[in-house]
Image (cartoon, rainbow, N blue to C red):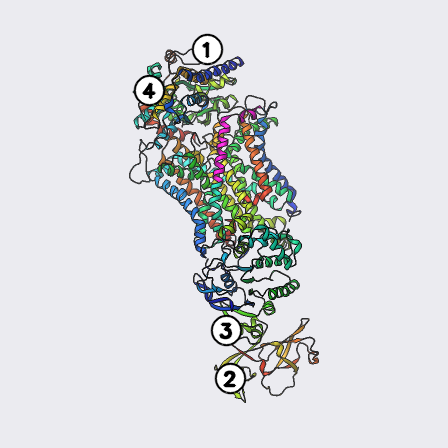
Amino acid sequence: MHEGGLGKGAILLYSVTGVITFFLLVPLLFPIALSFSDTPFVVFPPKGFTLQWYWKVINEPDFTTPFMFSVQLGVFAAIGALLIGTPTAMGLTRYSFPGRGVVQGLVLSPLVFPMLVTGIALLRLFTSINSNSSLTNLVIGHTLVTVPYVIRTVSASLLLIDPSTEDAARTLGANTWMTFWRVTRPQIVPGLFAGGIFAFVTSFDNYSISMWLADAEHFPMPMAMFALISRMFDPGIAAIASLMILMSIVIVVVLERLTGLQRAMSV
Amino acid sequence: MSRLILNRRTLIKTAGAAVLAAPMGYVRNGWAQGKQIQIGIWGGNQGEFVRKNVLPAFEKEFDCKVLAQQGSTLGQISLLRASKEAPKFTVMFVDDLGVEIAKREGLIDPLPKDKMPNLGQVYPRFIYNDGYGVALMISSAGIFYNTKTAKPLESYADMWDPKYAKAISLVTTKNTPSVFMAIATAAVVTGKPYKEAQYLVDQAWPKLAQLKPNVLKLYDTDDAPLLVAQGEGVMGGPEYSKYVYPYQVKGVPIDMSFPKEGAFAGVNCQVFVKGGPNPDLGAAFMNRVLDPKVQQGLAEATIAAPSVGGIEFKPEIAKMLPYPDKKMDELGLFSPDWAYVNKERPSWIEKMSQIFVS
Amino acid sequence: MMDIEVTNVAKRYGTSLAVSDVSFGVEQGHVLSLLGPSGCGKTTVMRMIAGLIAPSAGSIAIKGKPVTQIPVHKRNVGMLFQNYALFPHLDVAHNIAFGLEMRKVPKAEALKKAEAVLAMVRLEAFGARYPHQLSGGQQQRVALARALVIEPSVLLLDEPFGALDKKLRENMQLEMRQLQQRLGITTLMVTHDQDEALTLSDRIAVMRAGVIEQFGTPTEIYERPVSRFVASFIGTSNFFTGRVTAKVNGGYTVECPDGVRLGFNGTPPAEASVTVALRPEGIQVSPDAGGDPAPNRMRTTVEQIVYRGLSTHYYLRRPTGEPLVVVRQNDSGADVFAGLQPGSAVLASWAAERNLIVRDDA
Amino acid sequence: MAVAETLPAPQASAGRGGLFAFGNSRALGAVMLLAPAVLFFVVVFVIPVGLMIRYSFYQQTSTGDLTSAATLANYVRLGSVDLYRTVVMTTLRVSLWTTFIAMLLAYPLALVMVRGHPLVGRALTVIVLAPLLINVVVRTYAWRVILANGENGVLNWTLAHFGLGPVRLLYTEWAIIIGSVHVFLPMMVLPLSAALGKINPAVEEAAATLGASSFAVFRRVTLPLSVPGLAVGATLVFSLTASSFVTPALLGGNFAKMLGTLVEEQILVVFDWPFGAAIATLLTIIVMVVNLASVWLIERRFPSRAAEAG
């Protein structure tokens, strides 16, 4: 279904697509270009070439501390989302029961519900129950908004496997857990993997939840970026942005290699 | 300028070293071992200096942990309110206006004088609201401008000049200096000094609305002076000098101007949270902030005046500082009647937002 | 002894009954087919025996042991799934060894046994392949090996040949039957394919709408269908309805509304109105000689002739307009058929024993 | 629902497997699998949101305590003060423009992704989706650099080389719209390409054999069949734009204020919790109404596709 699939307008369509692609890519390329500038401030066009800003920022605690914290938070959130999302995906894909639509709507709602509001509501909750552990609060908040991604990717994987392989395993003597572990899990590895990465990335990039729940000791990367943008005036800020962009590109390529991006991300 | 940069780097080093060296002279502080407090501070150079130069030495000496959260005065107050039942913070940095609010709402206790010997060196005028707050740093507030493309502002009235169309970055209504803009406008409208104009701000709104064509944005980030220096408009503010001079010191073409109506005082204070965890450690920290060496380091990092007396500065720094206190008087630094302003503030914020938000 | 005993089993989903009050048994070493159209509940019955679905009522016993409360993984049944359900992430050897591992057989030993079973299904060299590298027939043999290696109490086959093409299907059916007989394993098969059921089974249970319509040997099912449904689902039948009218020496007659009369031997049934099934292969055709119609004969017109290789189907039309199907083996050489063309008038006739009274449940 | 197991189940049938059948009870299996998530969502999502909405019916005294009686005062204030009406209008305007532009840009992208050369499609997928994984602060930072008004602004610098400009975009609604389109475009492309991918090419071929020109095929067959994907994408983009905070905060210069920035200001700066809650509730209502309308549209117009598109 290619070659001619686009009909007569192909050339026009490809050109338009090219322009839009340019629009998409340019903002990702600029920070990279600016980050090599050998000037004390971010200037355009960049002048000279230096790697000193990279060296500077990887030694800058205002960058490394939030970075490491966000990695930690992202891992916790991904684990939480996998633990909650995987059984949910199985329940939703393997059973039909009255109220299934309601449950599905509920667990996927953080995708469309204004995240800002989710964050406020959580802040309200944690304040009223006196939950002062910012890390716990953040992990719960991030798990909440990343679970839908795991449910989606794992459900997509579950729908691709033949459920009778599970029946087969059970007739062969595997109990519920063994069936999951030895038959279901290996077959949904791409979904689990994609879901985990998604949860991690979503958490790593989250601002709207973190802005309400973070505190000085638990200060995630996007908020640090927000603060650094207004404080760091040298190309170090561009270097940080470039590092973030590079990290994302690596993740995208890995995901695309492993599972086929579109399936993993389809909403 | 480059000479200045060199000097400044050296200065910071010296200041840092002095702070680091301090522990030797103190008694062991075993009682604080393993304890932790949370404090609220500002961002910008001042915040950075506190986090990178003051806290590490303090933590080492007391074998404790200090968590510093950056925010604005009103935001810090809201944090105190939110955790009123179970306070999280022990020490909070707020502007002078915040001392009044926090005291009125019963969020803070009087400063523990007996545990803060350094209070004795503070100019008496900088102890606020019957000992509920003490200044740690005093900036002057005015308008910053791009030295390449503009001249110092002579009068606030000049801001309305059509040649500044879309060239002024006004401070966000969220931040304290927005109050100064309202008062300055009232002064322009009424021709009265700040002292009287501050009660006549209601007359300022129509005039302020006329400023809108000249306003490029309402900034709420610390880099506004830098952006002006890079050619985004020509001036901005009102802003505390502590957010502007550090850029100038680094060679950015930016300077402060204090129009003839007068400069405003930006007084950074610290307060002692009611019922906060580990109050003794908090008191020790507040005392440390008033330590002359710390005060000097802070002053040099942010080019703002200390609140304690008897500190010597190099001439090129000294000339930028409203210090000592006599010089403050000469500059006529104005502090609004915060009790009155705080009461009116919410409606001022709403009015100003209404004017500028399209 | 019955290896599988199903007693009064029912399955209800909400208000609808998928299976109602089904009872049957499978003798040791026998193959029983559950035959019926899709949706008749046959798969549900099999899955209840396997333990994959819990019955709403009734009890099930395997090898004399009640299993209704025993979870599927402890029932020791070997099940062959419709699409084989091979584990795509495991190679053939590990697929087969899976059941043994679940039984805590040491891995090495399990793999050794797997090899032996692979030899049994003639796939010795395929242990390291993955399911997607196998053809349909090979996949089926692996699935069979996987089900058999655990030495199951009974073997359950769910539409085992449905995914294979015709030729391969016939080969596999024979192979399966040989293997089953060699192992003597009691087998329950679910199928909607009558040929398959007739070929492979010792007993057939014809199911319809959740109940067993008829239970018997393949011969009984084909030759003595009890209902119009069975008569039409297995093979083809012509149907007549009429009233029992006269008793003639040792027999009786059924008269149809269009005047056709069907003659029977034996005692008449209790009902006054009956349905009669007539297999198309029992009907003779001769040139229309005219005259009074005797019982078991009728005048018809040829409508359509379809040559089917082994046989030819003649679609005849009765004076009433109703069709009558006649099937003739092509090697039977009766030349009376040779000259028939659409439009020819012919006389259809058959022997009295060809008339089967069935329950009218259509 | 009830007859799931006997239903002719297409593909991997929902309900057929029943992996987790505890004590042979499938109902219990479903409950055990879903209970943790439902409990989690009720405790940390449903209840908190409910509490927040309830909060919006109270008022705060100057010392931060709540008034005792429920009141609609916050909502009256939202509706009657010009500032807040302006902000609501700005939010709607920016969100609608963003959605509209995203639709225009997404269509060619999705078409090429689905129908173009497979290699191009693959590359395009990566390019379209990569930004999604880059945090919004970084992306917005980039736009600030590009749109900057001064001599360092990339766009103005470029325009100057062609003797054009300068244009003033930063700190206007258009800056927010440009930034939002960039940030949320993938959310439009994904469902749209999914919908396009589901269109049976034979349907388009059939239209062509019936005499429809390429354009007519697109307008009469492809476009209508892609509406569900478009609706889902539009809903997502609208919702996300309306409730965004970072982009308006960094690109809007506080001039073009949106509901998100207003909420943040009320709660974290002015600390008027109940009023902030009321704005948040209004934001939620706007977003949820759009979502429900979209679901309704899809289910009514495309009942057969509703299940897939949701």
Vertical order, C223 against D23 (above or below): below
Magenta residues, as a range? A51-78
Same subunit, tags 3 and 4: no
The amino acid at mark 4 is Lys
Tag 1 or tag 4, which sits nearer the N-term?
4
Vertical order, B126 against B71 (above or below): above
Q: Residue C136 in magenta? A: no
The image shows residue B308 at horizontal and vertical percentages of: 37, 14
Q: Residues within 10 Å of mark 2 (few under 14, many from 20)?
A: some
Contact? badges 3 and 2 (CB < 8 Å): no
Q: Residue at x 54, y 30 (%)?
A: A241
Vertical order, C286 against A127 (above or below): below
Can you tell which of label 4 and label 1 is closer to the viewer?
Answer: 4
Q: Chain for mark 1?
A: B
The image quarter in which residue C119 lies = bottom right
Q: Residue A56 in magenta? A: yes
User: For mark 2, what is the residue?
Assistant: C268
Kindly identify which numbered label has been placed on residue C361: 3
Q: Chain for mark 3?
A: C
Q: Chain for mark 2?
A: C
Can you tell which of label 3 and label 2 is closer to the viewer?
Answer: 2
Q: Residues within 10 Å of mark 1 (few under 14, many from 20)?
A: few
The amino acid at mark 1 is Lys
Q: Secondary structure at mark 2?
A: loop
How far is the residue under mark 2 from the one under mark 1?
131 Å
The image shows residue C268 at horizontal and vertical percentages of: 51, 84
User: For mark 1, what is the residue?
Assistant: B314
User: For mark 4, what is the residue?
Assistant: B115
The amino acid at mark 3 is Asp
Front residue of C178 and D167: C178
